[in-house]
Image (tube, rainbow, N blue to C red):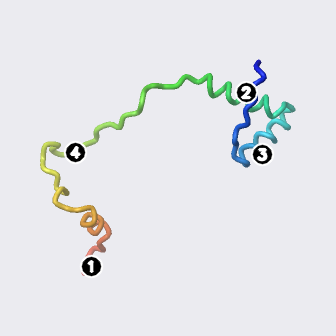
Amino acid sequence: MGDKKTTPDIHDALLDRAKRHAKKIVRPLRAVVEDGLRRILAVPVSSHHYQLPDLSVGDTDAADPFEAYSWQDLRGMMYEKPETG
């Protein structure tokens, strides 16, 4: 083990939980933090990124029916109240 020391900036609520946990298991806070780091670093990092499945419907080569509308037009249509009567 080296003598290098680092002071991490830990959110107060998380630090309080870690301190209570350390006290409960009768271990120094430093040991609890180091154990946590060892656990998370032992998990292999996946290089595979999730890709959303293509759930397109209809003819994907057809013209986009919304192309002629601006975002403001579309927003107005979405929030229009249906006519009753």
Residue placed most toward the observer, 59 or 73: 73
The kind of residue on which mark 4 rests is: Val
Instruction: Characterize the local packing of mark 1: few (<14), some (14-19) or many (20 or more) Cα atoms within 10 angstroms.
Output: few
Q: Which residue is label 3 attached to?
A: 16
Whichever of callouts 4 and 3 sits on the residue coming sooner in the sequence is: 3
Task: Measure the C-alpha gap from mark 2 to mark 1.
Answer: 64 Å
Which is more foreground, mark 4 or mark 1? Answer: 4
Quadrant of residue 2 within the rendered picture: top right
> From the viewer's perspective, is residue 6 above or below residue 62?
above
Quadrant of image for the C terminus: bottom left
The kind of residue on which mark 1 rests is: Thr
The reply to whether callout 4 and callout 3 are in contact (CB within 8 Å) is no
Task: Measure the C-alpha gap from mark 2 to mark 4.
Answer: 49 Å
The kind of residue on which mark 3 rests is: Asp
> From the viewer's perspective, is residue 54 above or below residue 62?
above
Q: Which residue is label 4 attached to?
A: 57
Quadrant of image for the N terminus: top right
Which is more foreground, mark 2 or mark 1? Answer: 2
Quadrant of residue 51 within the rendered picture: top left
Task: Measure the C-alpha gap from mark 1 to mark 3.
Answer: 57 Å
Q: Residue furthest left?
A: 62
Q: Which residue is label 2 attached to?
A: 35
Whichever of callouts 4 and 1 sits on the residue coming sooner in the sequence is: 4
Left or right, residue 83 beside residue 20: left
Rendering coords of residue 73 (x, y %) = 24, 66
